[in-house]
Image (spheres, rainbow, N blue to C red):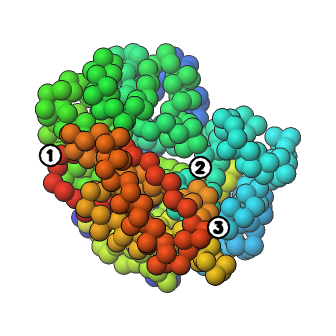
Amino acid sequence: MAGGQISHLSNGTTLVSFCVNDKPNEHTFAGCFLRLLLVFFNQIEMTVVRTFLSTRWRDRVGMDAIRRHQQRQLRDLLKHAQASVPIQQERIQSTKLLDFTDIPPIGKLNMMAKISDGVDHDMLSRLGSSAEELDAFCDGFYERDAYWFCNHAMLAESTGTSGTKGLFFRSRSELEQSAAIGMARSGSRPLLRILKHRPLRRAIVLMRNSRYATWQGLNDASHKYARFVDIRIFGNLDDPERLVHDLNAFDPHHLGSVPMYLQFLSQYKLQGKLKINPQTILTGGSTFTPADFALVKSAFPGARVTNRYASTECSPMATSCSLGQLHLFSDAALLEPVGEDEEATPLDEFSHHILITSLLRRFQPIIRYRLMDEVKISSQACGCGSPFPVIEVRGRSNPEFPATMNSGDEGVVRAIDLQKCMSSLPMIRQFQVNCHTKNQLDMLIFVHGNDLDVAAFRQRHQEEISQKFSEFLREKKCDQYVELHYEYLKVDLSKQKRQAFNLHI
Ligand SMILES: [Zn+2]
């Protein structure tokens, strides 16, 4: 069957859809050989090897194996969460697989009310710890650099959308499974390159933030797998000339970054200033449009460009194929596109938001958790032959930031209103808002253009921007409590067509 086939877990509700195509993936012989080599080198944990092997096997066997694995994982997850995670006990009750969509959705506020209620209490006992110790660890997260709890689970902050700190744990084993699935579905070529070029030079262009899962994972991997991979994080984003110089000196085999930085690196490459020729490029973190893909491919024609869709709460969720389509990892994550009323959205239509369930996470289970991304599941199979459904992600839908109104009542600042206000300021092309503390909005403004540096931009425009925004807060009747903090970041997108304002949250 060339089209899609839907898996129903309750009466008529689409839980996960599969594009049925039983064509097996390739690289199997090379894959087997490399697995043996990895074991031989004894540098990769057995969880990684086991997950890698089973993922490659499922992909080869096809849809039935994937579906069986998914159902088994879901059954195990629900049983586990009901038995040992307080916040899940009431939600799940005696839910069977077929009642899965009866479990009420949950949001960040509920998950964060008492973080220890959302974690595995049996594991806490086995670790010799307690709920109180875990909550104290979370409370102290912002005062220190440590992010490993009892050497068992890594604590990371999700990017703020609600004003509530989103703190999520992933155990070592969950992180390894997640990495292995990503590796298994990147084909064998990247692994062959690791062996061929050992150590593989991996450049990551990313703002340094030790509280984000991506940074933590890279930091740990750079020490752990130093024999295989030389990972360098390039965080000097406010000085593009220096960044280009450093990248040229490092000459990476692999380049990873968010779409926005890849755009400006592509421009530098097209101008001949950036001389690197990475064989693989990985991106993610915000919308990567077909135009972005085309730009990056034109600048780096020899590179395999992969886009990954993931979140701190659920990773990995999807990765792009050779045709640039995002394929959902149905055996690692369940993704339910829903409308504002949280009823299932039909195939081929964008959702208002999604409910995600991670099939990998056990220490802090994520079950029917609201994520404010607009996602569409396609009914069409992809030409690449992958058995996994094609999804399209349009970004976050209209988040709200909690705020105290001048009247003293609790209210919100809506992102869409903020966006309208900023769109009236012609000098701003792109900005980002983060809200880590209630009543404090951190605005990151991207300075475009070749000539103007950050200091000159700030001097010329800061007053007008502040004034405009103060008016906005007065209009919204929350200027007595809500504060704004500004930061600026230089990017060079002068050759790019002016885009609609981008709100990354
Ligand atoms: Zn595909």
Q: In the picture shown, does residue 219 fall above or below 372? A: above
Q: Quadrant of residue 105?
A: bottom right
Binning the other alpha carbons within 10 Å of mark 2 as few (below 14), some (14 to 19) or many (20 upward) gives many
Quarter the N terminus occupies: bottom left
Q: Residue at x 51, y 25 (%)?
A: 222
> Mark 3 or mark 1, which is nearer the start of the sequence?
3
On the image, the x and y values in percent for residue 255 come to: 33, 32
Q: Which residue is mark 3?
A: 109
* Disc 1/disc 3 C-alpha distance (Å): 42 Å
Label of residue 398 in the image: none
Quarter the C terminus occupies: bottom left
On the image, the x and y values in percent for residue 428 come to: 30, 57
Q: Which residue is mark 2?
A: 157
Circles 1 and 3 in contact, beta carbons < 8 Å: no
Q: Residue at x 36, y 70 (%)?
A: 421
Whether residue 82 can be seen here = no
Which amino acid type corresponds to the residue marked 2 in the rendered image? Glu
Q: Is residue 104 left or right of residue 18?
A: right
Q: Which residue is mark 1?
A: 495
Mark 2, secondary structure of its residue: strand
Q: In the picture shown, does residue 221 fall above or below 420? A: above
Binning the other alpha carbons within 10 Å of mark 1 as few (below 14), some (14 to 19) or many (20 upward) gives few
Point out the frontmost of discs 1 and 3. 1
Which amino acid type corresponds to the residue marked 1 in the rendered image? Lys
Binning the other alpha carbons within 10 Å of mark 3 as few (below 14), some (14 to 19) or many (20 upward) gives few
Q: Which is more toward the observer, 494 or 151?
A: 494
Which amino acid type corresponds to the residue marked 3 in the rendered image? Leu
Mark 3, secondary structure of its residue: helix
> Mark 3 or mark 2, which is nearer the start of the sequence?
3
